[in-house]
Image (tube, coloured by chain):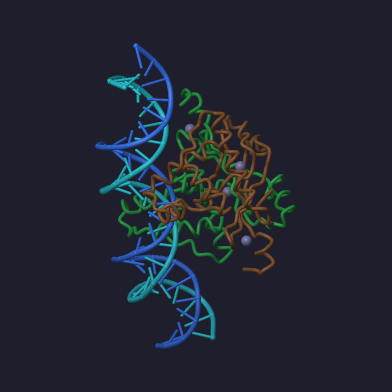
Chain colours: A brown, B green, C blue, D cyan
Amino acid sequence: MTGFETHDHGDCIARGLAQAERYCAAQGLRLTPARRRVLEILLEEHRAMGAYEILDRLRAEGRGAQPPVAYRALEFLTTHGFAHRIERLNAFVACTHAQDRHAPAFLICRACDRVTEAEVAPTAGELGRAAEAAGFTIERTVREAVGLCPACAGAGPA
Amino acid sequence: MTGFETHDHGDCIARGLAQAERYCAAQGLRLTPARRRVLEILLEEHRAMGAYEILDRLRAEGRGAQPPVAYRALEFLTTHGFAHRIERLNAFVACTHAQDRHAPAFLICRACDRVTEAEVAPTAGELGRAAEAAGFTIERTVREAVGLCPACAGAGPA
DNA sequence: GTTGCAATGATATAGTGTTTCATTTATGTG
DNA sequence: CACATAAATGAAACACTATATCATTGCAAC
Ligand SMILES: [Zn+2]
Ligand SMILES: [Zn+2]
Ligand SMILES: [Zn+2]
Ligand SMILES: [Zn+2]
């Protein structure tokens, strides 16, 4: 898991982009400049970013930057698993796992807003059983835990 | 679990209100008219409602209805466990369980937006272990499953 | 009564996301 | 290459969600 601890970030960005390129080439998807750049921004920051925060970055680079530019790129990235949406924050984060279908879960620090992606089993145990009992078909689950990361917990109770 | 199946709804509303009144009286909380009415609306509809949808209802009743009216009432209700926020829908739903501290989880139909609250254990198993390993302190978890309810699944694939 | 605090009223503003339609760019076909 | 098709982008306007701020009112404690 990457996230709260430090790591070789340059490598982390390069691998994320290379992986997305490979996957898109294999699947016939088009990782266009705008999409690629948004993914790169998310990988660079390595944190959850709002769509308008991403837009500001694009503007600073001289690109056209109306809201749909960001939302379209983000829809592509989330649909194909390169990024995830954090419902709790109305924000987006680059995926830190392989492109194989996975059910993401997140640890969100309420003090610094940093996000760590944890790997969990695709079908939630208890919730899955409740769904089955109700005749409900689960297609996707959102699992987000809000709390304090080690750094912020150490900095004293907020 | 109440939600997708039918039930005695009048009784369901009355019990929800009575329970909130008892709890507030016991805890010295003030279930003011605005707060009580918003809870009643949520109980009546028995579905997730947006804040502005609730506002429309209040307006129709001649009450003042600026956004803070709804958001203040909803903050009170969610803080004390009478209602929950559904992150996925930017909406709110009356709690269908007792006021004891519980970690709610929801089944959300993507076709009709109806929501069912399921009871699950407070500390998520897998996510809890991941948090512990990372030194992360979980304070609250969001668990929302998106899929198809029995009625919408039966109506044919969307 | 008056002091202190919680709740409300009212206005404005901030933040997030979508619709729409015209235009361009890539892709495939005769 | 010429053409048809579909995907992606550009651009403007709009819709939805939520908060900030400050004055005022209601209520209880002292
Ligand atoms: Zn992921
Ligand atoms: Zn933190
Ligand atoms: Zn509940
Ligand atoms: Zn349904």
Q: Is residue B47 visible?
A: no
In the image: residue C24, left or right of residue B141: left
Query: Residue B120 location in percent, x, y?
Result: 66, 44
Query: If the image is split into quadrants, where does the C terminus of chain B sit?
Result: top left
Instruction: Return the residue nearer the eye: A120 or D12.
Output: D12
Q: Is residue A39 visible?
A: yes
From this view, report whether residue A85 is shown above or below residue B76.
Answer: above
From this view, report whether residue D27 is shown above or below residue B17.
Answer: below
Query: Residue B82 location in percent, x, y?
Result: 53, 53
Instruction: Return the residue nearer the eye: A103 or D28.
Output: A103
Residue at 49% over, 59% down? B75
Instruction: Return the residue nearer the eye: A76 or B24.
Output: A76
In the image: residue A119, left or right of residue B12: right
Q: Toward which corner of the image does residue D10 lie, by quadrant?
A: top left
Query: Residue A91 location in percent, x, y?
Result: 51, 51
Count all numbered tags in the image, as a single digit: 0
From this view, report whether residue D12 is shown above or below residue A22.
Answer: below
Instruction: Return the residue nearer the eye: D8 or C19.
Output: D8
Query: If the image is split into quadrants, where does the N terminus of chain B sit?
Result: top right
Query: Residue A16 location in percent, x, y?
Result: 60, 43
